[in-house]
Image: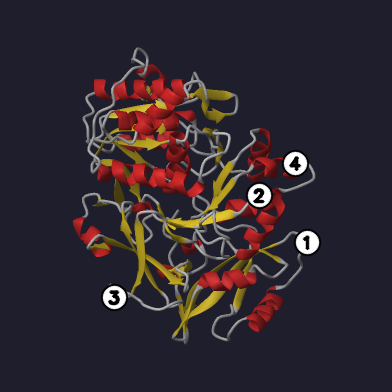
Amino acid sequence: MLNLSVLLEHSARTHPDRDAVVLGDIRLTYAALDAYANRVANLLVERGVKPGEKVALSCPNTPEFVAVYYGILKAGAVVVPLNLMLKRREIAYHLADSDAVAYFCFEGSRALPMGPQGWAAFGEVDTCEHFFLITAEEDGDIHGAERLVDALAGCAEEFESVATEATDTAVILYTSGTTGRPKGAELTHANLVLNTLTCRRQFGSHPEGHERHLVALPLFHSFGSTVQLNSGISDGATLVLLPRFDASSALGLLEREEITFFAGVPTMYWGLMGALNDGVDVDRIARNLRVAVSGGAALSVEMMKDFQARFHVQILEGYGLSETSPLATFSDRARPSRAGSIGVPIWGVECRLVDEDWHTVEGADRVGEIAIRGHNVMKGYYNRPEATAEVIRDGWFRTGDLARRDADGFYYIVDRAKDLIIRGGFNVYPREIEEVLMAHPAVSLAAVVGVPHQSHGEEIKAYVIRHDDADLTEEALVAWAKEQMAAYKYPRQVEYVDSLPMTSTGKILKRELGESPAESMRPAV
């Protein structure tokens, strides 16, 4: 028997008086958080929610997310976290597709109007019977919706967690849906417990026994939920929550809360470096920061070097997807990092490179699609046996991501298979072009896509954010790139922009750039 909620229960017994979650002036101890989750579990059982049934959750990084997440698990139900950027139609789709019987929804704000959207979507799904409105305001209300604070009134703070099998589904994480309608990846209790314990093995523990995480990654995403939520809770860490990433706010929390563990996507690191000013005590942050983790997309070599030089901490890069719980490969903190590498397979996991027919691609530095096998691979896509069969064979899951492996076994993402540009018959990997462009002193951030071309099939176009004081013209950057790269690689088109479209997890949405036929990056660690 195994239930993911044991992570919280153990830390509540071991560190009852330690701060578990922090948000502004709110500080909940482990004992208080566990009691809160128990009340949620009692509520679900009282409303007739049975073990194995699905319960959806739309909530930013707040204490309520953590309590509801573990409360659902304690009741033996399955957590279905939803992206906060979803609109009414999309929410209704996820509720119906997952067969959710209950829905916890954050009321939101003018900038994030989740409550009304969620309430309207709930009304469209007949199988979903219970709607609980999460609101931080005492007078928060949506007409007809049941406020969570009222629903919990009278619910006991004690609960004996439902015994679940290790192979039972614990969480359903929906993929981004860039290649069709989103699919729900079923992750078991064993998937997530083992991936969580591997995180602790990978990153080690604080020498004084008390890690302090800055949680800027959204908890509805696999990166944040495993690497920080589950891993941090299992370690008795204090999770300092940041509901919406803002570089200046993040730097302030890194300093004031004496953060020891930071995880982010490359655009977060880019934002932190851009927000540094004389008012930031970099030395104080560096003294406390023990672990820095990057994933979700490739971190540029220049950004890695700049961050490590300022904060004196090695950035550990990892790789994985929602379907792999998510960790699959990671840098080894005991060995010098290799610029641009996503590391080696984590404990208990195998990786290989395959061609379109699943044949292994042999030899160092040859490009193939990453395939993964191990304790981290999902059960499958919920109610989609055909889609599951397309990506899983003999326990191996093929990711759709292209990589090479060096002679020492270190993996390097070449690009997403869906982002590959074919120009005049030559394969061009956007990530390589982006790395070169970002080496130019005037370039702050770059995203490269393929755009339709009458004779070449696709042409290479770069969307570029310049440093504030740069006056480099588009033509000058094209000319510079021409000197740096082979004739078939350099971008013929450059467009300067003030910002790039990003997902709620901070990854660049390439499908929204121009007329690119390339699709957005798939979810990864």
Depth check: give the residue in front, 345 or 464: 345
Q: Quadrant of residue 304?
A: bottom right
Tell me residue 88's x, y (percent). 38, 42
Is 478 on the left-hand or right-hand side of 100?
right
Residue assigned mark 3: 359
Depth check: give the residue in front, 5 or 452: 5
Secondary structure, mark 1, is loop
Whether residues under marks 4 and 2 lie with C-beta atoms below 8 angstroms apart, the answer is no
Quarter of the image that includes the N terminus: top left
User: Along the polypeptide, which appears first: circle 2 or circle 1?
Assistant: 2
- Mark 4 Cα shell of 10 Å, populated few (<14), some (14-19), many (≥20): some
Depth check: give the residue in front, 294 or 420: 294
Spatial CA distance of label 4 from label 2 is 13 Å
Tell me residue 499's x, y (percent). 61, 57
Q: Residue at x 36, y 56 (%)?
A: 177
* Residue that protrudes farthest toward the right in the picture: 278
User: Along the polypeptide, which appears first: circle 3 or circle 4?
Assistant: 4
Q: Amino acid at mark 2?
A: Leu
Residue assigned mark 2: 272
Q: Amino acid at mark 3?
A: His
Q: Residue at x 58, y 77 (%)?
A: 491
Q: How many marks?
A: 4
- Mark 3 Cα shell of 10 Å, populated few (<14), some (14-19), many (≥20): few
Q: Which mark is residue 281?
A: 4
Q: Residue at x 55, y 65 (%)?
A: 340
Residue assigned mark 1: 469
Taking 100 as reference, is 483 above or below it?
Answer: below
Depth-wise, is mark 4 or mark 2 nearer the camera?
4
Spatial CA distance of label 3 from label 1 is 50 Å
Q: Amino acid at mark 4?
A: Asp
Taking 71 as reference, is 406 above or below it?
Answer: below
